[in-house]
Image (cartoon, helix red, strand yellow):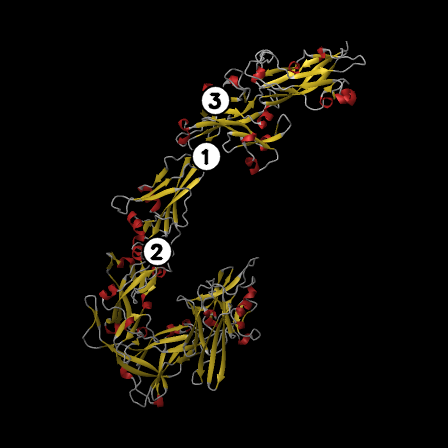
Amino acid sequence: MNKKFLNAVLFGALLASSTGTFTSCKDYDDDINGLSERVDAVEKTLADLNTKFGALAYVKSVSFANGVLTVTDQSGTPTTYTIPDNDTNTTYTLDVTSSREGNVTTVTVTLTGSDNSKIVKTFTITDNDTVTQDTKLDPTKFWMDSEGVMWYGTKDDKENSIKTGVAVPKQPQHDKTTVSVVQYKDETGVVVGWEILVDNQPLSTKLLIQDVLPITSFEYIPTKILAGWGERVIVFEENSYKQKTIVANEVKTSATATLYMSNVAAPQYRVNPSSATLAQLTEEGKAQILKQTVEQVTRTPGVFIDWKKTTIENGIMTVSLEADPALFEDEADKLDMIALQFETTAKNKVTTEYVGVINKDAEIDVVLTDKAVTATNPGDDANHFAITKADAEAQVAKIDDKNMPMTGNAALVQNVTYSEAIAGINLTELVSACNVKDAAGHKFFDYTKYPDLTLSFEAVAYKVNETPQERYMSLDGVTFKAVNYGNVNESCIGKAPMVLAKLTDSHNGNAIVAAAYIKLLIVGDAAAKPEPDITITENATIGIDCNNSAYTWSTNDEFMSTQVYTFSTNEKLTALSKEQFHTLYGYAAAPVVGFDNVGTWNVTEILTAGDNKANRGAKFELTTAPLEAKTYVAYAVYEKTTDADVIVSIANGGMYPKYVAIKHVVKVDPINFTATAKEKAPNAWNGNTASIYCQTPGTTNTTQIIGDLNELFVGGKVQFDYSSSFDAGKFPSFVADNMEYTFVFSEKNLKATRGLVTGVDGTQYQLALNADKTELHAVGKDLTGTAVASAITADNLVASLSDANNNDVTFANTAVAKNLLNKEARGADSFYAVMDIVYENGCDMTVPVTNGEFNLAFIRPVNVSSDASKFFTDGLNEGDPANTLKLGELVTFTDWRKDSPLNSFAANLDYYRYYGVTKIECKGNIADVVETDWTGTRKTLKEAFGAELASQIITITSKNVTYTTAEVTAVPDFGTASYIKSSRVEIKDYKLYIPLTITYTWGTIEETIEVQVKATK
């Protein structure tokens, strides 16, 4: 049920108990405490419908509407409590208590919220007040017999119970059968009983209040006491007035004869039970007037009071009566009294008490006012509506940017909300009236109790800014409806139609009693919240680029007209014309929070000559250079004006978002193609390995190890082919004319990939690169992280690259480089560096080269081997020169070349000087380092012969050699090796393995030579 309305005290009646609880919340279905799944649960649920609110006769009614709880006492005085209408959680409890002191009863009404809020108000009742105990509907007295018939009374006393006429038929049952009871209303919306639903379908019979609880009495609610009599009276007012006319859009008072209204009164009666409805009376509540005079003075019979109308609402009956003023008792000691008699649909008659009636005449001058004028608030002249069209036109009636009435509007302008205006508004609810002829000067005039007075309305034509306001309204009798001109949603908001209100008297040929011009302002239902900001996105995709000529994109008229001005992404907003858009919005030159660019951009507004608010747009210039493979974003932002006059000049201007942004998204694709280095010089390669050598001997050469990597390719340079996916239009920075190549040392040289490298002396290193990969270094094997780069020095340089393409390679003349170079002779195990070819454009963007990686071997300049023609012989005489061999002749020297005699030192003796061979030596204790196969397996001399004899096998004497500029013509004297063993037994052939260290320009070479010892002679 709708819990907001506290006539949830059930159909207007105040039910049993003294406390009622309800919740301030949104509407719920009109179901009442859902019944159980069985039909026979109806009885229990009816009893539980509402056991709230006491039978205290002090409270006449309780109602809740529009956030206000109203408690009305028996005298008709309302006490109000404001309930937060947007609070959907708080439960409120209403407590009614009373205390008595003397002849005064104090009634306290307390409203307590579950949030601990509390409102307390009181009123008093004296013994002189009439308090009628209202007959209450007791829902606990409903019961259902075995046939499904509903009764009202005591279940055990069927004879004295009332048969309601409602029978619940037997219904097919299933697992989810539901039964509920809902309010049943007549065509006017008045609750007259209940309707029972089974599985949400109504039964054919209904439980009506009139079937259960008939009307028992009416109690007159007095408003006047006759002076000198102390008697409650009904006053019939005989009012006279001067007719009004409309002349040239102005309301004027006629100077013609005085007119008289019909003589009427509208007494009110409290109905018992208060849950009764007009449906319980016959002939729409027509009353028979019973008359008498006090002191039993009988007058001439005649009907001098006629019944006009009866209404019952919230337990109060109002009866409209009209009298003939000439027939009222005019003797001072006599008073006419009347009672009203009604017939119920149950055919019984109910008669009110007798109340005095008198006639009162007065001259009135009625003016129409705003609804603030009431019986308790007569107001003043400020409440008078305008009596000229010009005055009404001059009233300020504007809305602000939120579609709310603007501060400074005229007070008499009637604000009507959009949704209510579209649905239809009863204009009579906006209008009240006052009598300015009253002695008090300004008194509320209730025209509604005069059946001959009618308030009507006419549309008044006028313009605001050349826009006819009447086109935004329609009138159907007293119902005003707003009209969206041109079917543009909410286009009527901010418009101010005008009506002419006329109060006419049918008793006098529809003479005008009062008239006024009323301006209505159509406003938003609530403060208009702008729609969310709108962003129109334009996407573009380009290739990665140097962006030397900055990328640009500009909107055109078609884009602005079809994408921006249309607001097509929001169905609530209507498309604007160019002029409207650029009137409502201005270009935001400064950055706007929330619209953050990615990348460096220049975004500017495009203006046409004359700044005519048309054909505008935005230019986007991406100045980031070079472009990365990522997404760049820029915004051109238009910001709505804060000028309320501009906003309201556009239909629904307040709804349009604060910002409209054009978002340009540029996706930069990475390269999707590769390059292939082509036309390697075939003779320069051994598979994927090329080699760098020492310069060959000559008068102008040195022993540098250098080379030109370009010579490895046909034509002396590297040339490239692109894969088929290359698109020169998308990647203009990568066309051949913009590309260059370089050689670099590859990162595959690093420890993570290659591991460690070893020098001739056994030292292990890890290779390292400088920042631009043009230097190769060898550093400590255990270094990690930044320590590797920090360890790079000139002393541990291994090789370097130089020249335009890094094509010139030089092997370093450092101890570390020499150590690595001399580890192996020319061959598969020569020291090498992994190289990369880098192909890049003018802004250092690279294209992967599919075959750009290769190995570059650095070849040791000098090789050493045994001379098989040199040998020792066992058993010769001591000191025989045949057993003393020159070290220079004991070994064979060749340079890095393969072919003899070109590579032979023996054939080219000056090679000793050119390559700087300065020493041949056997390092260490000969017995420990020289080996022999004397025992059949290779062992050191000490192991083979024992320590004493091992020292008597061979002696080696080394000499240092120096060179002059003179050409060498004989093998230099590097010393000798002598076989000194004295044979005590005959021996066969065996071998000596002598480790020699050769020192030359590029370091030292360690080579073990094999010397034959021939058998004993």
The residues tagged by marks 1 and 2 sit, at their Cα atoms, a distance apart of 45 Å
Mark 1, other Cα within 10 Å: few <14 / some 14–19 / many ≥20: some
Which one is nearer the viewer's eye here, 995 or 978?
978
Q: Amino acid at mark 1?
A: Pro
439 shown above or below 721 = below
Mark 3, other Cα within 10 Å: few <14 / some 14–19 / many ≥20: some
Q: Amino acid at mark 2?
A: Gly
Considering only order in the chain, which callout, 3 or 1, is on the residue closer to the N terminus? 1
Q: Can you identify the residue that label 1 sits on?
A: 670
Residue 345 location, quadrant: bottom left
209 shown above or below 800 = below
The residues tagged by marks 2 and 3 sit, at their Cα atoms, a distance apart of 73 Å
Which one is nearer the viewer's eye here, 630 or 468?
630
Secondary structure found at label 3: helix
Considering only order in the chain, which callout, 2 or 1, is on the residue closer to the N terminus? 2
> Horizontally, is 462 left or right of 417 in the view?
left
Which one is nearer the viewer's eye here, 1 or 393?
393
Q: Position of residue 765 (x, y in %)?
A: 60, 31
Which one is nearer the viewer's eye here, 288 or 922?
922
Q: Amino acid at mark 3?
A: Asn
Q: Can you identify the residue that label 2 sits on?
A: 654
Q: Can you identify the residue that label 3 sits on?
A: 710
Considering only order in the chain, which callout, 3 or 2, is on the residue closer to the N terminus? 2
The residues tagged by marks 1 and 3 sit, at their Cα atoms, a distance apart of 29 Å
**Residue 754 shows in the view:** yes
**Residue sitting at x 23%, y 60%:** 462
Q: Which mark is residue 185?
A: none
Secondary structure found at label 2: helix
Q: Nearer the viewer, mark 2 or mark 3?
A: 3
Q: Quadrant of the C terminus?
A: top right
Q: Position of residue 110 (x, y in %)?
A: 48, 74
Secondary structure found at label 1: loop
